[in-house]
């Protein structure tokens, strides 16, 4: 079955530390892959997306993600987090069925 | 710079009431979507529409219906609200092929938090 898995429900990091949020997908081919962020009380905002080509994708707000076909993964990274990065992050995939399938989300807490 | 507007941020309704959630987009997008967001379950697609008067069921359509009489407006209807429909509802819109076009993206509204008591 086609699915998106975010294994970490909640992650806490110190301000200034590096961040990696994990995302795996299950699909017989390579889907289109997305990362969204939802700040408290806000809708979802697209951080970045991967369709093909260079497996390292740069996004907004200093985020990047790396697609690894061998691991069916699309992990989101940031070298140094800021307090304003505290939010919920969703990985999503398009499997060719006219809709976007979302993971369950990872809540990021930043400690001073 | 508002792109997708949901008419209410918070709603409290009684069990059995008919509930309308409204969504309006100002980008002339063909596609519109209604998602439900619950803790631990992420976003699940309820219905989507790719044209006026057209609709398709998503993953969890039971208990919901939709209406799209004009291109810019997509309404989600709970015919008889139940407590298990208490949730955050998110509307989104995208151009045709929005999920597959590298040069476009979908936009989400701020959500409507519905409580059914």
Image: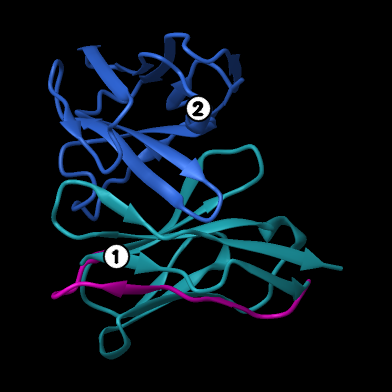
Chain colours: A cyan, B blue
In this rendering, the answer to whether A86 lies above or below B109 is: below
Which residue is rendered at x = 47% and y = 30% of the image?
A: B85
Work out how far the residue at label 1 is from the one at label 2, CA to CA, in angstroms. Answer: 33 Å
Does the rendering let one see residue B108? yes
Residue corresponding to mark 1: A3
Q: Main secondary structure of the magenta part?
A: loop
Q: Is residue B111 left or right of residue B22?
A: right
Residue, x 67% and y 59% (percent of image)? A85
Other-residue count near label 2 (Cα within 10 Å), few / some / many at <14 / 14–19 / ≥20: few
Chain bearing tag 2 is B
Q: Nearer the viewer, residue B57 or B48?
A: B57
> Is A51 left or right of A6, judged from the image as shown?
left
Q: To which residue does mark 2 refer?
A: B1
Residue A23: say if magenta: yes
Q: Work out whether residue B83 or residue A79 is closer to the camera in this orientation and state it.
A: B83
Task: Classify the position of the C terminus of chain B by image quarter.
Answer: top right
**Position of B88 relative to B16 (above/below):** below
Q: Position of residue B81 (x, y in %)?
A: 45, 18
Category of crowding for the residue at label 1, using alpha-carbon neighbours closer than 10 angstroms: few (below 14), some (14–19), many (at least 20):
some
State the residue lying farthest toward the right.
A112
Magenta part of the protein: which range? A15-32
Nearer to us: label 1 or label 2: 1
The answer as to whether the residues below labels 1 and 2 share one chain is no
**Looking at the picture, how far across and down is residue B57, in whole percent?**
20, 34
């Amino acid at each position: 079955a086609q699915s998106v898995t975010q294994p970490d429900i909640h992650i806490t990091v110190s301000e200034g530390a590096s961040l990696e949020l994990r995302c795996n997908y299950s699909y017989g081919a390579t889907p289109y892959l997305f990362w969204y962020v939802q700040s408290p009380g806000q809708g979802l905002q697209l951080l970045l997306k991967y369709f093909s080509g260079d497996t390292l994708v740069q996004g907004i707000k200093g985020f990047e993600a790396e697609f690894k076909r061998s691991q069916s993964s699309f992990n989101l990274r940031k070298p140094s987090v800021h307090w304003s990065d505290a939010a919920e992050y969703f990985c999503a995939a398009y499997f060719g069925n006219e809709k976007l399938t979302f993971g369950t989300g990872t809540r990021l807490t930043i400690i001073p | 710079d508002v792109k997708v507007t949901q008419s209410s941020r918070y709603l409290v309704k009684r069990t059995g009431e008919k509930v309308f959630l409204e969504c309006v987009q100002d980008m002339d997008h063909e596609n519109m979507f209604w998602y439900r967001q619950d803790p631990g379950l992420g976003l699940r697609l309820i219905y989507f529409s790719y044209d006026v008067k057209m609709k398709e069921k998503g993953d969890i359509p039971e208990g919901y219906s939709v209406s799209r009489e004009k291109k810019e407006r997509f309404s989600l209807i709970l015919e008889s609200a139940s407590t298990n429909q208490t949730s955050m509802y998110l509307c989104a819109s995208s151009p045709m092929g929005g999920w597959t076009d590298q040069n476009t993206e979908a936009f989400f509204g701020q959500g409507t938090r519905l409580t059914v008591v």
